Image (cartoon, helix red, strand yellow):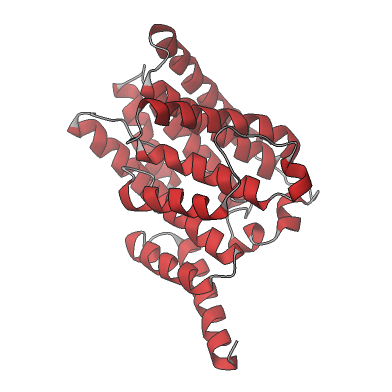
């Protein structure tokens, strides 16, 4: 079970200028330069105020900032189910919360306008996939309301499935379906009877396959897919794979202090096991 965060997104067949703005914003986000990321997202929105993905990008920066501030992104949190489902109350930043949900709502309002004209609009479907995924993360990890978050998780997954039916080559959408596979596969067997997701078997193996597809071929979510894979391999006791992924990510995003810290932590664990023959 991992953060689905959010982060986003491809605007297919976009002009070069737009692609550069998106890529630059995501690079600043992956480097944990939240102020820099906001500048790029704000510029994108100013140039394309009717594009729902612009507000989804903005929401992702607010969410990532808050998850980092509350220390939710650390591997110790996701490696321990008790910390994920624990009742320890967090203190969310109310201003960030308000801005986050305002960006989510604006993205979905713009997506609704596109869907009213074309129910199969791929950009609108993906914007909904992202924003419902981010709503899931905030509800589950910040507000600690896991059961309530399932409604948004199901919506995000359904939008991803609908998008992939329209365009199987929309690789970034496999990130959502991969996370759904892992989430359902991590639930106790008797709970799976009550948690139903379309086109989902609850296969952890399929989850890895989907995420590896995004890691290799995603237009914008490839780095995030690698982050999620590093967490999954950590949870499944495949530490060398975690180290390999984090080593590459620290080279790619050298300004990100969390990636460096997690890489060193995982590397030391592997070295310690090797020294003791474990």
Q: Residue furthest bottom?
A: 276
Depth check: give the residue in front, 150 or 206: 206
Q: Is residue 88 above or below residue 234?
A: above
Percent x, y for residue 118? Answer: 38, 11
- Residue 159 as seen in the image, left or right of residue 183: left
Q: Quadrant of the C terminus?
A: bottom right
Q: Residue furthest right?
A: 87
Q: Is residue 32 visible?
A: no
Percent x, y for residue 59? Answer: 50, 33
Percent x, y for residue 235? Answer: 61, 63
- Residue 119 as seen in the image, left or right of residue 144: left
Count all numbered tags in the image, as a single digit.
0
Q: Is residue 178 above or below residue 75?
A: above
Q: Look at 44% across and 66% down and name the residue there.
A: 246
Percent x, y for residue 131? Answer: 52, 30
Depth check: give the residue in front, 121 or 92: 121
Q: Look at 51% across and 26% down and name the residue there.
A: 103
Depth check: give the residue in front, 101 or 248: 248
Q: Look at 49% across and 26% down and name the residue there.
A: 128
Q: Look at 54% across and 33% down and name the residue there.
A: 157
Q: Residue furthest top?
A: 117
Would you identify the image quadrant in which residue 158 lies? top right
Q: Is residue 162 visible?
A: yes
């Amino acid at each position: 079970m991992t953060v689905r965060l959010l982060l986003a997104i491809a605007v297919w067949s976009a002009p070069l200028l737009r692609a550069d703005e998106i890529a630059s914003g995501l690079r600043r986000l992956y480097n944990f330069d939240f102020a820099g990321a906001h500048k790029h997202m704000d510029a994108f929105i100013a140039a394309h105020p009717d594009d729902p993905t612009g507000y989804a990008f903005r929401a992702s920066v607010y969410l990532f900032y808050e998850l980092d501030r509350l220390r939710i992104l650390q591997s110790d949190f996701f490696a321990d189910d008790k910390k994920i489902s624990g009742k320890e109350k967090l203190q969310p930043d109310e201003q960030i919360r308000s801005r986050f949900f305002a960006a989510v709502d604006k993205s979905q309002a713009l997506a609704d306008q596109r869907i009213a004209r074309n129910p199969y609009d791929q950009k609108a479907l993906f914007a909904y996939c992202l924003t419902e995924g981010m709503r899931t993360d905030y509800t589950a990890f910040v507000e600690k309301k896991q059961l309530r978050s399932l409604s948004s998780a199901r919506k995000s997954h359904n939008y991803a499935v609908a998008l992939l039916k329209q365009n199987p080559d929309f690789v970034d959408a496999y990130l959502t379906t991969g996370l759904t596979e892992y989430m359902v596969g991590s639930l106790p067997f008797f709970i799976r009877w009550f948690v139903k997701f379309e086109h989902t078997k609850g296969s952890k193996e399929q989850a890895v396959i989907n995420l590896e597809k995004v890691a290799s071929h995603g237009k914008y979510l490839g780095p995030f897919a690698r982050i999620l894979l590093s967490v999954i391999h950590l949870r499944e006791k495949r530490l060398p794979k975690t180290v390999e992924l984090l080593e590459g990510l620290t080279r790619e995003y050298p300004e990100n202090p969390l990636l460096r810290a997690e890489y060193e932590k995982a590397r030391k664990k592997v070295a310690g096991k090797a020294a003791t023959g474990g």
